[in-house]
Amino acid sequence: NAGVTQTPKFRVLKTGQSMTLLCAQDMNHEYMYWYRQDPGMGLRLIHYSVGEGTTAKGEVPDGYNVSRLKKQNFLLGLESAAPSQTSVYFCASSLPPPGKGTEAFFGQGTRLTVV
Amino acid sequence: EDKVVQSPLSLVVHEGDTVTLNCSYEVTNFRSLLWYKQEKKAPTFLFMLTSSGIEKKSGRLSSILDKKELFSILNITATQTGDSAIYLCAVGMSGAGGTSYGKLTFGQGTILTVHP
């Protein structure tokens, strides 16, 4: 049982380049989340999704886009990477929403460096 | 704006000490509060709290929620060096159709360092 899988695990981008981070979960979860974590900081919510075909903005959505075309996948896109987007990105999923007996499960993270 | 605030931001103790970590929140349509421990990589789940006054316990760790005063505490007794980690608090929101439906917001985390 793979759980939540993020790809890639590491990436170095040049300023202005674009890329997509993939999050895949095999637990049939409805809710999926993208967070970023900076040194010594907690997790800041970028975007989230409460079901296939739906997305919503979190606290720090600027510079990112997301799509949830399939229930098991949640993609995070950077159209024009900036050094301020250097961070560790975590994907998480949950079913049902937190509070009905299950917690959010996390992927192992993607370390992104923008130079 | 939904807000989750943890304190202290960092804490250094010696093995055997007892620590109390705090998490306060101001959110729309509270559903649950979760505690996570993060060492090198992904956060790992500790507790989920939905009802006031009911203590959750796992070994040396315990946690309780106060929905009237909008906070939770995480206690760790007889700390060990293996407890060194970032402790994260998160609040899940409900409210079908509302702007925060399904949102899961984390605090800044408390960095706990336990010295031998």
Image: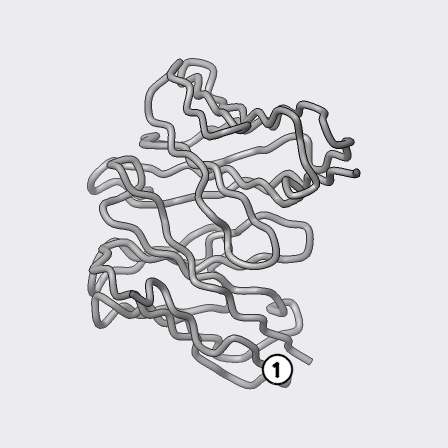
Residue drawn 33% across the image and 37% down it: B93
Three-letter code for the amino acid on which mark 1 is drawn: Val
Residue drawn 65% across the image and 67% down it: A84
Q: Position of residue B116 (x, y in %)?
A: 79, 38
Question: Chain letter of disc 1?
Answer: A
Please say if B103 is above or below B33: below
The residue closer to the viewer here, B59 or B62, is B59
The residue closer to the viewer here, B7 or B62, is B62
Q: Where is residue B110 in the image (x, y as percent from the top left)?
A: 64, 38
Q: Is residue A34 left or right of residue A85?
A: left
Give the secondary structure at mark 1. Answer: strand
* Residue underneath mark 1: A12
Residue drawn 47% across the image and 48% down it: B44
Please say if A49 is above or below B54: below
* Quadrant of the frame with the C terminus of chain A: bottom right
Q: Where is residue B92 in the image (x, y as percent from the top left)?
A: 36, 38
